[in-house]
Image (spheres, rainbow, N blue to C red):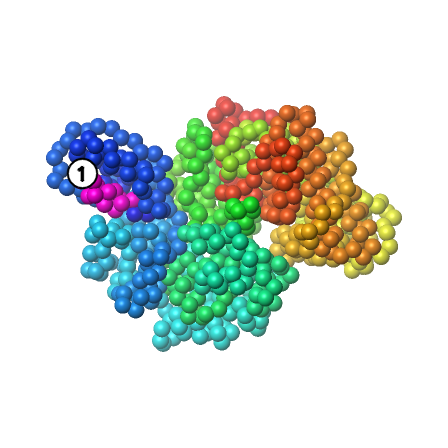
């Protein structure tokens, strides 16, 4: 991130002598000069650091002067325990982009231009100290011109490890599916292929993407069919902010779209957005990102219109990042490959965020964010590995006050994803020199992340209940240790009573929790089939609301008439759940939005999309004995559906009614506990309609409300919560009982 060159320039400006270098613990410097100059130098280390640098602390001690004649950068030292922090991959800076677009510059049109302020970091680093030899750029010796920039303290590429140019750096090629190179400029030819409706595999920073012209319905439909991705919206890349504004209401997301991290940002779609229907079917939002490498900038400008840029895989597989693997897996999908010869060491998906109250609400934390640590306000007695959950998996290493939450790994039930998970843990352990003594895991014994933990030798295992981990994640995200009244709403998690939880009110701190209240438990007829087929949850909830006397005329019953009776009969023996996610599924099916899902959470996502945000009516729901009677909500939904009320109004009244009932639960808990801080977590709180309603009402009622901003509220944040719990119990000298 250019800190040593910055120190060198600072020393030259102030007129002090000495040296600066990297070691395994960070940056070290020895400086001598007049007392005032030395004091100014130390202040500058803190106050004038480069844009990518985060200076956590500066420690100093006096040493005898030796009469150094000047100030130099010395060779990095690899010995000792590693405490160096590795930067995330960073979007192309304005200076580098200016060179790429300048016909007079020697890097004109060069897709791998970078400097100390931008470019690849995490995806190419093999180890620390962070020097070229410890990156995948080691195979590209510097040409004289680049070597001169690298050695010049006045140049912004001074000691920039990935520095390169067309003479000495990676090369870009366009090939057909058989691997035959295509003549001419690869970027211009690739843009031509996209305009012609072809599907293109593009090698980026952390893996391969699949690209098509977003305005071509045949091209987008072909990509969906080949990728086996039926409904999930595709992400879009646009050339600049003006192009984004033509598609979406950017609002307060401008600094996020244009910042150094460049995530996919989910934003309200403009009615006039000219896109193929298959880009985001049934969705009022679009996932938009701006170019983050010179290659993406060049391709976006050459094409001149938005293009789909989605992960290079078949649905449910991890993104392809190895060239041979990409050729094997993507040849049947892509009509050509735009690739380069710089190896990717760590596959990394694009990050995804929503906006909430002007801040980021992470949905997937990956490229641009990981592996930069989250600073916590507490010391960790012994190093911790937290193994995360089964879906949307991440892991976390916790040492000192640094929580290294991994990039998004994915769903561990896929073998290739699980292998990426185990390799990722090994890489992080080497990179940050963390040898975990305590290993935290979910209580569910069948999670592959749990089995990974229990297979480790010589460690102390800490089981953390799923929803306690969600609330602990929100606490750690906000630098709090509790107690809080934690509302955890998600799909499923194994509860301490052996049932499946998912709509919980917990009195919690980082050490332990007490279950105070929950959503009404209902059967899941068919078990996992009820997750894939939301109409089954509608059957369970209707049985709860009406007993055996269902009202006539419900379309969900008519649509599934051939299976309704046997599935309804299963409700007497099925495993029960208090899941808020399954409640959303039931309402989605009742409203006619979704009977069958093709990706996790689809029914709830599409139900949120139907909300009329101007509607303030709400369905009533009783709160009795610590139970939110969600069957009341379902009955009210069914009554309005039968009365012909528009789905947009039904969805809004359901959201409003659930929010009001949840707030009543929290307010009642405040009366008995005296706690007036609430924490909102779990994947259901990715729903910004529900999150807004609950937050507004709690705030109006005098609560301090904690929400996520650094890690996702979904299972991608679970590992941070597990780590925080394990460390807190370690500080407390043992585990806590949970009810």
Task: Establish if 231 lies above or below 359.
Answer: below
**Residue annotated with mark 1:** 16
Which of the image's four quarters has the C terminus? top right
Which range of residues does the magenta coloring cover?
3-15
Residue 520: percent from left, percent from top:
74, 39
Residue 527: percent from left, percent from top:
70, 47
Quadrant position of residue 322: bottom left
Between 565 and 25, the one nearer to me in the picture: 25
Q: Is residue 12 magenta?
A: yes
Element on which disc 1 rests: loop
Q: Residue at 50% of width from left, 24% of height from top? A: 732
Q: Residue at 57% of width from left, 73% of height from top? A: 218
Looking at the rendered structure, the number of numbered marks drawn on it comes to 1
Task: Establish if 487 lies above or below 649.
Answer: above
Task: Establish if 293 lies above or below 667.
Answer: below
Say whether residue 294 is left or right of residue 22.
Answer: right
Residue 377: percent from left, percent from top:
45, 31
Residue 454 in view of the camera: no
Q: Main secondary structure of the magenta part?
A: helix
Q: Is residue 28 magenta?
A: no
Residue 343 in view of the camera: yes
Between 89 and 651, the one nearer to me in the picture: 651
């Amino acid at each position: 991130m250019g800190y040593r060159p910055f120190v060198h320039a600072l020393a030259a400006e102030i007129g002090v002598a000495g040296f600066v270098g990297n070691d395994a613990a960070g940056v070290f410097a020895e400086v001598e000069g007049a007392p005032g100059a030395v004091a100014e130098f130390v202040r500058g280390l803190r106050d004038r650091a480069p844009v990518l640098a985060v200076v956590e602390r500066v420690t100093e001690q006096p040493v005898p002067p030796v009469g150094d004649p000047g100030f130099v950068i010395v060779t990095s030292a690899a010995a000792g325990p590693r405490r160096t922090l590795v930067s995330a991959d960073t979007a192309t800076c304005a200076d580098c982009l200016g060179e790429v677009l300048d016909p007079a510059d020697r890097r004109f049109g060069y897709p791998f231009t970078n400097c100390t302020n931008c470019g690849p970091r995490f995806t190419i680093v093999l180890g620390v100290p962070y020097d070229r030899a410890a990156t995948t750029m080691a195979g590209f010796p510097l040409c004289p011109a680049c070597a001169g920039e690298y050695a010049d303290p006045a140049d912004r590429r001074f000691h920039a490890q990935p520095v390169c140019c067309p003479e000495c750096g990676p090369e870009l090629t366009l090939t057909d599916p058989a691997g035959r190179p295509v003549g001419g400029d690869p970027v211009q030819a690739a843009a031509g292929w996209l305009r012609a409706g072809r599907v293109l595999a593009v090698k980026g920073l952390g893996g391969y993407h699949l690209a098509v012209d977003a305005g071509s319905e045949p091209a987008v439909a072909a990509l969906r069919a080949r990728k086996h991705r039926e409904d999930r919206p595709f992400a879009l890349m646009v050339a600049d902010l003006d192009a984004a504004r033509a598609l979406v209401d950017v609002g307060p997301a401008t600094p996020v779209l244009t910042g150094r991290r460049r995530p996919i940002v989910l934003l309200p779609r403009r009615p006039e957005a000219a896109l193929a229907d298959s880009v985001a079917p049934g969705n009022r939002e679009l996932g938009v990102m701006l170019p983050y490498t010179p290659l993406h900038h060049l391709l976006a400008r050459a094409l001149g219109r938005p293009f789909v840029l989605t992960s290079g895989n078949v649905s449910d597989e991890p993104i392809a990042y190895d060239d041979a693997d990409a050729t094997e897996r993507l040849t049947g999908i892509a009509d050509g490959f735009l690739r380069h010869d710089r190896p990717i060491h760590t596959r990394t998906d694009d990050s995804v965020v929503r906006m909430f109250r002007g801040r980021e609400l992470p949905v997937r934390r990956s490229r641009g964010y990981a592996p930069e640590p989250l600073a916590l306000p507490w010391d960790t007695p012994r190093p911790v590995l937290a193994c995360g959950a089964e879906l949307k998996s991440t892991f976390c290493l916790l040492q000192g006050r640094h929580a290294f939450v991994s990039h998004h790994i994915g769903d561990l039930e896929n073998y290739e994803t699980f292998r990426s998970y185990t390799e990722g843990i090994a890489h992080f352990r080497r990179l940050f020199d963390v040898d975990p003594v305590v290993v935290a895991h979910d209580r569910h014994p069948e999670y592959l992340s749990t089995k990974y933990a229990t297979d480790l030798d010589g460690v102390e295992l800490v089981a953390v209940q799923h929803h306690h981990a969600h609330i602990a994640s929100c606490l750690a995200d906000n630098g709090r240790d509790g107690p809080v009244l934690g509302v955890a709403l998600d799909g499923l998690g194994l509860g301490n009573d052996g049932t499946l939880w998912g709509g919980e009110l917990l009195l919690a701190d980082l050490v332990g929790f007490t279950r105070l209240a929950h959503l009404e438990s209902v059967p899941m007829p068919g078990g996992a089939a009820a997750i894939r087929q939301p109409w089954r949850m509608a059957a369970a909830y209707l049985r709860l609301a009406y007993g055996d006397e269902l009202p006539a005329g419900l379309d969900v019953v008519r649509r599934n008439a051939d299976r309704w009776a046997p599935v309804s009969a299963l409700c007497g023996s099925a495993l029960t759940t208090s899941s808020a996610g399954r409640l959303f599924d039931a309402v989605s099916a009742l409203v006619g939005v979704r009977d069958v899902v093709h990706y996790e959470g689809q029914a709830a996502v599409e139900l949120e999309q139907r909300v009329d945000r101007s509607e303030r009516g709400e369905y009533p729901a009783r709160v009795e004995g610590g139970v939110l009677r969600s069957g009341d909500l379902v009955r009210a939904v069914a009554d309005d559906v039968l009365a012909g009320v528009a789905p947009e109004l039904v969805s809004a009244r359901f959201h409003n009614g659930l929010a009001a009932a949840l707030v009543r639960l929290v307010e009642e808990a405040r009366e008995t506990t005296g706690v007036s801080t609430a924490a909102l977590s779990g994947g259901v709180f990715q729903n910004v309609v529900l999150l807004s309603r609950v937050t507004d009402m709690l705030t109006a009622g005098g609560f301090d409300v904690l929400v996520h901003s650094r890690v996702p509220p979904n299972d991608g944040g679970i590992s941070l919560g597990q780590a925080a719990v394990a460390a807190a119990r370690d500080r407390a000298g043992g585990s806590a009982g949970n009810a």
